[in-house]
Image (cartoon, helix red, strand yellow):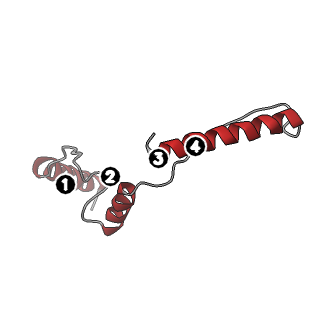
């Protein structure tokens, strides 16, 4: 086949696809997590189970080995533990 015939064949195929195939993008409830895939059902089940409370803090100091920094971190840790215990109890 020559280049002109290849181009015509490609044009016909593109025309058939454009004419008969629905190319409208759709996003439905199964777009990210399909109910038909067992692994996504496991992940969904795990999201339904409440896990432990996580709190991530970013603390800065020019000298993390200083006594004042360590004292402040200990005090902050005690405060956070007391607060999270009251969260767990529903207070």
In the picture, measured across the screen, residue 71 lies left or right of residue 1, that is right
Mark 2 and 4 residues: CB-CB less than 8 Å, in contact? no
In the picture, measured across the screen, residue 54 lies left or right of residue 6, that is right
Q: Rounded to the nearest whole Å, what is the CA distance between mark 2 and mark 3?
A: 35 Å
Judged from the image, the secondary structure of the residue bearing numbered disc 1 is helix
Residue at image position (22%, 44%) is 25
Residue at image position (21%, 45%) is 26
The residue to which callout 4 is attached is 55
**Which residue, as the protein is rendered here, is positioned at the far bottom?**
38
The quarter holding residue 42 reads bottom left
The residue to which callout 3 is attached is 89
Disc 3 or 1, which lies upstream in sequence?
1
Q: Given this view, does label 3 or label 4 mark the residue nearer the observer? A: 3
Specify whether residue 16 is in view.
Answer: yes
Placement of 21 over or under 35, stated as above or below: above
In the picture, measured across the screen, residue 11 lies left or right of residue 39, that is left
Say which quadrant the C terminus sits in: top left
Judged from the image, the secondary structure of the residue bearing numbered disc 2 is loop
On residue 13, the disc is 1
Residue at image position (38%, 55%) is 47
Say which quadrant the N terminus sits in: bottom left
Disc 2 or 3, which lies upstream in sequence?
2
The quarter holding residue 27 reads top left
Placement of 56 over or under 62, stated as above or below: below
Q: Position of residue 4 (x, y in %)?
A: 26, 51
């Amino acid at each position: 086949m020559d280049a002109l015939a290849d181009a015509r064949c490609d044009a016909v195929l593109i025309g058939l696809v454009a004419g008969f195939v629905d190319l409208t993008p759709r996003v439905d409830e199964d777009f990210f997590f399909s109910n038909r895939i067992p692994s996504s059902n496991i992940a969904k089940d795990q999201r339904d189970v409440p896990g432990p409370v996580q709190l991530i803090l970013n603390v800065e100091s020019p000298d993390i080995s200083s006594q004042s920094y360590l004292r402040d971190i200990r005090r902050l840790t005690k405060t956070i533990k007391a607060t999270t215990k009251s969260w767990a109890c529903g207070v």
